[in-house]
Amino acid sequence: MKVVILAGGYGTRISEESHLRPKPMIEIGGKPILWHIMKQYSQYGFNDFIICLGYKGFFIKEYFAHYFLHESDVTFDFKKDNQLVTHHHTAEPWKVTLVNTGVETMTGGRVKRIQNYIGNEPFMMTYGDGVSDVNIAELVDNHKLHGRLATVTTVQPSGRFGALDITASNEVKGFQEKPKGDGSWINAGFFVLQPEVFNYISDDSTIFEKDPLEGLARDGELMCHRHQGFWQPMDTLRDKNHLEELWKSGEAPWKTWDRESVILK
């Protein structure tokens, strides 16, 4: 099953970084957040990626063009016509297809543009700016069980600020550092989609989260996979710094690929 990653937006809310490079290339722990997302899928045996490019897409092309070299121990033998000898590498077993889907194209349009690379097969799709510890194997299994056209992972995000538990007499009974917002479940990406979903997308102007998802819901073809664990988008510089702090602590919740409990597909 192929994995489609949307990586073409402007990232205007994190312009401190995105004016230099596309948001999926902003680094956490010295690696682009795009790499972190791909590592999560790869741990479950999903290594065939299609990345939808747009704004500053050439940065992503150049990254993968040199990825194997950067992850390898090499010898350049200039006496033998600059012969390159690879001794050892730690590069992932990835197949990466990079598709120019337009600078101004909306999310649905980007998905529509990679239809020929998918064919008549189910596929996964997510955004190139959010990390999670969602169990991809369970997500795929749940999608297969219900037999509908689409599954979206949903989460209950934490509130931005701490909340006080206050009585009617103004006595503070407790403090909750990161309460769950208003209890609503929101779209966290990490979709599993049948190829029929392409029929719900009109053109480049289609926003995937609008007409396609709303149409699937009306037709009874959209199910959710409720995720109770970690999920964090990187919308702002504050989000980026939070993820960086988690990574430096050695306890990044989304770094599940080194855990022995993970069962590969």
Image (cartoon, rainbow, N blue to C red):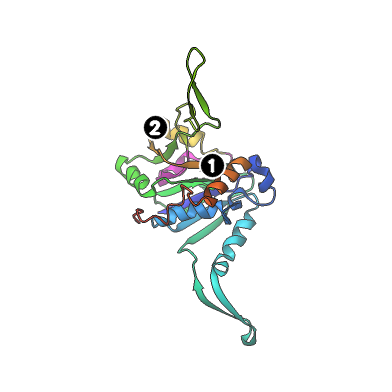
The residue under label 2 is: 219
- The image quadrant that residue 194 belongs to is top left
User: Who's the residue at 32% across and 46% down the image?
Assistant: 141
Q: Position of residue 211 (x, y in %)?
A: 50, 34
The residue under label 1 is: 233
Residue at the extreme left:
145
**Would you place residue 224 above or below residue 128 in this image?**
above
Residue type indicated by callout 1: Pro
Q: Is residue 14 a member of the stretch shown in magenta? A: no
Q: Position of residue 81 (x, y in %)?
A: 63, 84
Which residues fall within the magenta stretch?
188-205
Residue at the extreme top:
169
- The image quadrant that residue 83 belongs to is bottom right
User: Who's the residue at 37% across and 32% down the image?
Assistant: 220
Residue type indicated by callout 2: Asp
Q: Position of residue 3 (x, y in %)?
A: 45, 52
1 vs 65, left or right, is: left
